[in-house]
């Protein structure tokens, strides 16, 4: 079985390299990120590694480093290799091929509620991008089929994104909320790709915190230019 998915063909330039590790890929920080970078023909010495905290903190990066308390990283430095880790939260890849601005976001429900999508797009604008040029990919993540939440979480979202599951529980469509937010910020619908793969449903392929609990591994998502 393949150890990673190569998302590079989804983007409008052969120079853009993007991908995510799959469950058979050894989750072994920090070597796993370096290995995935090399697999995607990116320089492992140029990695930007956010230490994620489910926040709306977005960093504009100018050199390879570990960024504390950060869930989104954006840059216009083509030599940098951006990375995050996920296991149900949405890995979101942003690429502006015109201004060569790019970013990667770890978007769980907490981050989405507190505005990480907005802050990430604002950060790309700050370094020269125009949202209408952004190509966005929503990677494998927990979807409405499995994303059951209690009342306290459900009430933070517009009810149109919630359906009733068994036992009257609320099932949230977080991907549609993200797409709505992106479009409101000026991203073109035709430039947004939702992979529509559920991490919780696909046990052989993906790690899932919801399914596997605290022992769950993580997938590494990487984005860079070659
Ligand atoms: Zn599912």
Image (tube, rainbow, N blue to C red):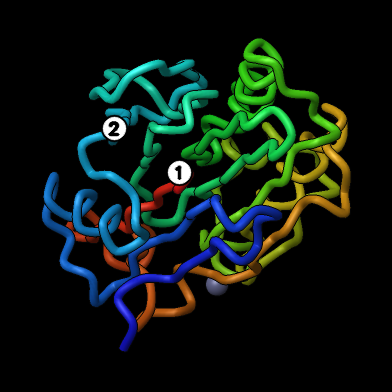
Local SS, label 2? strand
Q: Is residue 31 left or right of residue 19?
A: left
Ligand 1 found in image quarter: bottom right
- The x, y position of residue 101, in whole percent, is 61, 29
Q: How many marks?
A: 2
Residue, disc 2: 49
- The x, y position of residue 152, in whole percent, is 57, 35
Residue, disc 1: 224
- The x, y position of residue 168, in whole percent, is 66, 62
**Residue at 37% in and 42% down:** 84
**Residue at 80% in and 24% down:** 130
Question: Along the line of sight, which residue is nearer the eye, 120 or 40?
Answer: 40
Q: Is residue 20 above or below residue 86?
A: below
Res. 172 in view? no
Q: Residues within 10 Å of mark 1 (few under 14, many from 20)?
A: many
Q: Quadrant of the N terminus?
A: bottom left
**Among numbered discs 1 and 2, the one appearing first in the sequence:** 2
Local SS, label 1? strand
- The x, y position of residue 178, in whole percent, is 71, 42
Does the residue tagged 1 have its C-beta within 8 Å of any atom of ligand 1?
Answer: no
| Label 1 close to label 2 by CB (< 8 Å) | no
Q: Between tags 1 and 2, which lies in front? A: 1
**Residue at 65% in and 56% down:** 11
Does the residue tagged 2 have its C-beta within 8 Å of any atom of ligand 1?
Answer: no
**Residue at 63% in and 32% down:** 100
């Amino acid at each position: 079985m393949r150890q990673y998915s190569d998302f590079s063909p989804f983007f409008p330039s052969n120079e853009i390299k993007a991908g995510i590790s799959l469950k058979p890929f050894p989750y072994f920080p920090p070597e796993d990120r370096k290995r995935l970078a090399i697999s995607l023909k990116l320089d492992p010495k140029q990695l930007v590694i956010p230490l994620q905290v489910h926040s709306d903190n977005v960093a504009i990066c100018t050199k390879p480093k570990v960024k504390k308390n950060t869930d989104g990283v954006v840059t216009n430095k083509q030599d940098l290799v951006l990375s995050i880790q996920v296991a149900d939260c949405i890995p979101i890849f942003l690429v502006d091929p015109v201004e060569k601005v790019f970013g990667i976001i770890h978007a769980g429900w907490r981050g989405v509620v507190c505005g990480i999508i907005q802050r990430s797009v604002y950060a790309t604008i700050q370094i020269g991008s125009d949202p209408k040029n952004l190509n966005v990919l929503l990677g494998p993540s927990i979807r409405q089929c499995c994303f059951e939440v209690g009342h306290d979480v459900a009430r933070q979202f517009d009810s149109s994104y919630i359906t009733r599951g068994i036992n009257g529980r609320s099932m949230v469509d977080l991907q549609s909320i993200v797409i709505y937010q992106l479009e409101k910020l000026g991203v073109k619908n035709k430039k947004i790709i939702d992979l529509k793969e559920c991490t919780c449903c696909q046990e052989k392929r993906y790690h899932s915190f919801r399914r596997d609990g605290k022992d769950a591994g993580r997938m590494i998502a990487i984005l860079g230019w070659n």
